Amino acid sequence: MADLQSILTEVKRLREAVETLPGRINVSAAQVVVVTGLSDITEKLGLVQAGEFRVGNRLIPGDGFSGVRIGYPPFTYGTRTYHIAGVDADTLMFGLSATDGSAVFGGGFGLIDGEGLRLQSDTAVGGGGNNESRIRWYQSVLTDIADSDPVGQIAVAFDTAELRMTLFTNPTTAPSPDLTSTGVISVIRLAAQHADGDIADIRIDSTAGMYLESGRFGLTGSGGNSLVTLDTDGDVTLVSSNSSVIRIAPSDTGSVSENLNHIAPVRSGQVLVLMPNEGTVDVVAIDNGSTTESGFLLLANNFTMDTILDRLVLLGNDDGVDQYWVELSRSDNA
């Protein structure tokens, strides 16, 4: 068994060895590696099951962060959550959700999800907004941010007074969603074809007008001519679902003849074709009825429609003071 003296001697020897150890270690410059990132150590990250990858301006989200975030659980921006988010000054620019597959893009103005593609409308009718909603086509693939060779676009604009959708083709400049924009030459073709070969083709040409290139033209809806009923004052009220061909039914007064005094509302330029709904009660269109009311009739003279084959064609007019209907033609087939 070692005595205390031998133990003390061994401790002194170990102490002297430790003190001389630094001088006995030789390290070359090639053996020194400065690690600047995880990739300097390994190419394999391994499995990361939770947390966040964040690259950007090093500010904390909520304090002006700009950059990209990837993580689980997802991040909340507005009322939605995203597992991948591109952010500029804490404002979402794009985002992807692994929960429902939805994606926000275009600076937050576009969304695609299970309900379809949604685009925020322009902020003002007439091109006064930021044009976030435009869908554009180009002659060549874009290689930079600049708008080059635009050939067409669809634009939707909305404000508190109006909702407008316009389609441009062949613009010499990228116009605002305003039909009065300069430098726009548009030719729009709308075509629908049935399996048996029937085709309806409408051409709208800004230099020449609108044409029905092929197919049949009608003023009625697919459900047939609209039916309206005279009230006891001899007035007819139109609704948005009415077509331009109107069947007029008498009121329930039981009279053999009823007057037609007013048709409202009046849209300037609208064409109406009137016919009686039945031949048992005459409908008498009154010329220059009460002109203090909107929708009076300006006719060659009173016209009695006493068979279902009679027709009266009217054109709406609004001069800013009075709203009335002007006779274009009549057909008395009694």
Image: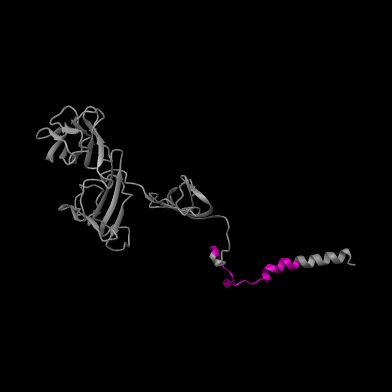
Q: Quadrant of residue 251?
A: top left
Question: Which residue corresponds to the image point at 28% horizontal and 54% vertical from the top-left?
Answer: 153
Please state which of residues 47 and 293 is positioned toward the viewer in this rendering.
293
**Residue extending furthest front?**
280
Please state the horizontal and vertical placement of residue 155, each as a whole percent of the image.
29, 50
Measuring 26% from the left and 39% from the top, which residue is drawn there? 227
Q: Is residue 100 above or below residue 13?
A: above
Query: Residue 256, percent across and down?
Result: 19, 30
Left or right: 234 as drawn, with respect to 100: left
Q: Is residue 32 magenta?
A: yes
Q: Is residue 117 above or below residue 32?
A: above
- Whether residue 3 sits left or right of residue 55 in the image: it is right
The quarter of the image holding the C terminus is top left
Res. 188 visible in picture: no
Q: Quadrant of residue 163?
A: top left
Residue 287 against residue 15 in the figure, above or below = above
Who's the residue at 13% across and 38% down the image? 327
Q: Tell which of 16 and 81 is nearer to you.
A: 81
Front-most of residues 45 and 190? 190
The quadrant the N terminus occupies is: bottom right
Q: Is residue 327 visible?
A: yes
Q: Is residue 274 magenta?
A: no
User: What is the number of callouts on the image?
Assistant: 0
Residue 247, percent from left and from top: 22, 39
Q: Position of residue 179 (x, y in %)?
A: 22, 47
Toward the viewer: 23 or 27? 27
Which range is magenta? 16-38
